Image (spheres, helix red, strand yellow):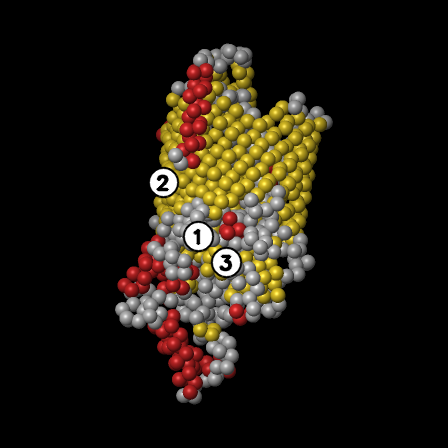
Amino acid sequence: MGKPYRFLFFFLFLFLCSATASLAQELGAIAGSVQNEAGSPMPGATIFIRGTFIGTSTDRDGKFNLRADFSGGPVVLSVSFVGYESRDVTLSQPDNTVMVQLKLNPTQTNEVIASASRVEEGILQAPVTVEKVTSQQILRLPPPDVQVGLNQFKGIDVNSTSMIMNSLSTRGFNSAKSERLIQLTDYFDTQSPSLNINTGNLTGLPELDIESIEIIHGPASALYGANAFNGVLLQNSKDPFVSEGLSVRLRGGERSFFDGQVRYAQKIGDKFAFKVTGAYLTANDWLASNYSATSKQVQSNNNAQGSSLGYDAVNRYGDVDGYTFAANFPFPEVRNKTVFMPGFEEKTLVGNDGRAKSLKIHPSVSYLLTSSIKLTAGANYNRGTASYQSTSRYRFKDFGTNQYHGEIKGERWFVRGQSIQDFGGNSYDLTFLGNFIQTSPIAGGNTTTTYAQRYYGTYVNTYVGARTAGQTDAQAQAAAKAAADPLQLDPTSAEFSALRKQIINDATVGRGARLNPSSLLNEGNAQYNLKLGETADLIVGAAYRKFRLGSQGNLFSDTDGRIQNHELGGYAQLTKKFLQERLKLALAGRIDGFKNFDPAFSPRASLVYSAGSQRQHNFRTTYGRAFRSPTQLDQYVRLDLGRVLLLGNVDNGFQGYSITTGRNVDVAPLQLERLSSYEIGYKGALTPKLVLDLDYYRNYYNDFIGAQRFVGSADGTRPETLAAGRVLQVWTNADQEVRTQGMAVGLTYAAASFLNLAANYSLNVQDRSDVQNAEFQTYFNTPKHKYNVGANGTVLNRVSYALNYRWAQGHEYGLPFAVGQLTDYSSTDAYLGYTLSQLGLTLQTGASNLFNANNIQVYGGPQIGRLVYLGLQLEVK
């Protein structure tokens, strides 16, 4: 029996054991309505029985009904709605005439979060910087991927490498890999086990099933462990006990864009509920088209853009450097210079795979073992096609994950487990594809001569002939290029099509471009919250995860079977309130152990003081230490890119020579990256309509993990000479401290129900004053200045709108694939909806990057242009 199914049988066993006792409860009926201050019904308001998982939501007329157990005394109904103050209603017996009126709170200062401290608390009292995005805000975000829309919130950077492939970061060191921020769905990790990346929302929740999104800024290893380094993104799904009925959303627009989503949830009796959510998205993808010369940091022997010798362009593949003129070549002008082939553009190699696609099917079941113990089990099927960027540009075609998860949760405890496996599908590496086309034997020629050899031979012979005939160097280079370029395989030919298909389908190392990883991650975690009197709490928890990496030698050094790796951790947090509960002290710590690294301890200490008559002014200070475990690729990769060999670095390290100076280089094995962080902040209501959110941080990184290139041997030993080695790239730790600092400020002004104004600004700075090793790349990849301004509201309870303008300052952006300068980039996003409440129907239109402004967020990535759509959303309760 497969491990994923063991989780389901385990939970089924517990269900059968407790079913008899739980069915014996006698429940009484409660019914009523929820209204606003004007007496209008409030559809979608949530009602929970405090201390239990029994809940529901109001229908389109604002009415609700549920059943409660009164055998233990009175019950308390907790009633809430986004943008309104929550209310508690105490009932001593069943009642069918409950009427609850909610008061408007447009600044949303009463929102409750659970991510910052792993227990529920008011968002104003959170000890760290945290953003909460509600379900209403999510459905008004115009971009096709919900995570792209998060860049309009304070301090959040989104890096898009295609339409539905992106990564999130806070406080610097952005990356298309999102390696310093963990992404969770209902607290389950959604990363690809092979690549240790979160593929945007490709493996996350469909928007119709997202109840809220919480984003922690900065280190959170004290409660979340490895790689909760610069933040945590938590997606919370909707509870089928509360959000019942059918929801459908259809959108279509430019670039042949189509997005269809459906969610159906049903409660059966008082104990059982299920939901099924499905989503399908497709569109013409954004493809990269940067033809500048690749930086010499990446391609050391590159020529200038436009050179008649050819040059390695960022987004051309197969522009291989197969011939370098010897130092004693007869014509000195070209000695030690390299000839490059023209190569192929990204759109040519991607060909018919140029559509972005995403398919998600997420079924789950929930059962109330008792009113305060809930069992949930589910499966997530995710597949998608998009482009990803790291050491190369990759076309993830039919890439996806299968995820099986289960949870048993009480009022103060939970036990969770999951198994997730990823699949490369038909994915391929564009650099490999271009290079292997060039180095393939000429079709139909009955020869072993390759296209590259024919090209270089023609180029050199033409050049020599032209110089011998008396032409200048420039004239000879031009003649050589004119003679050789037509000999590159014609992309419109049948031979090219057949060769492209052959190489894409071949996963053989050194011959094929197919990416074929299929790895597994099994994990489990548990937590218990102990009440220590009226003003103190202690939570304790533990977590275990095990990776089983597999690529058949295509990506990892796993030629002898799957690579096994594991992590184990335990944590605790003590919270105590003083001064009539205005001062909250929290002390947290976590110890993690690893297969390849020494144990790590991550402490966090915070103070939050709530001032004001309604505790509306909240001041916080936090100190935390965090750590980042090198990704599985950093530890175990073995990938030959031709010009450089990528190797994992958890064995005995490497010895070699500097590329630039030729001096000896010694590279130690990888260690954990460590961060010490200090933060102060304020969040509060300056007036009933004006909210200020302000934070400042300083970060100190030690053993910073970055890329280092040098000349060496694959076995780690130093070659006898510089010429005897080859260029290697490994990930290693800096022997110097890396420092960053920054601040962010956000203002929200609720002028009226039809006009809410928002603005935020972020500053992020890396201190490079003590950087000594110029060859060590930190890839800060973050705009120094950026800001958002926006407005949203509802007019006459029918028309809703949202408008946002985002701007970011240009900056250097580097990955092993490409390093270069981004110019300033911006985007204007807009949404407009018209609701026919009696039909449960909302007509929608929206646009991302409405004015098609420059919006390249990753160097070597695509322009994320304009996308305008029309749509509708149907809600049937």
Task: Answer with mark 2 or mark 3, whichever residue precedes in sequence.
Answer: 2
Task: Answer with mark 1 or mark 2, whichever residue precedes in sequence.
Answer: 2
Q: Relative to the observer, which residue lies in front, 847 or 701? A: 701
Which one is in front in this view, the residue at disc 1 or the one at disc 3?
1
Quadrant showing the N terminus? top left
- What kind of element bears circle 2? strand
Kindly identify which residue carries mark 2: 260
Residue 566 in the image: state x and y as whole percent.
53, 42
Q: Relative to the observer, which residue lies in front, 582 or 26? A: 26
Residue 847 visible in the picture: no
What residue is shown at x 58% (from left), y 56% (from top)?
Answer: 653
Q: Quadrant of residue 43?
A: top left
Type of residue at label 1? Thr
Numbered badge on residue 646: 3
- Between the residue at mark 1 and the residue at mark 3, the CA separation in whole angstroms equals 16 Å
- Between the residue at mark 1 and the residue at mark 2, the CA separation in whole angstroms equals 42 Å
Q: Quadrant of residue 836?
A: top left
Kindly identify which residue carries mark 1: 559
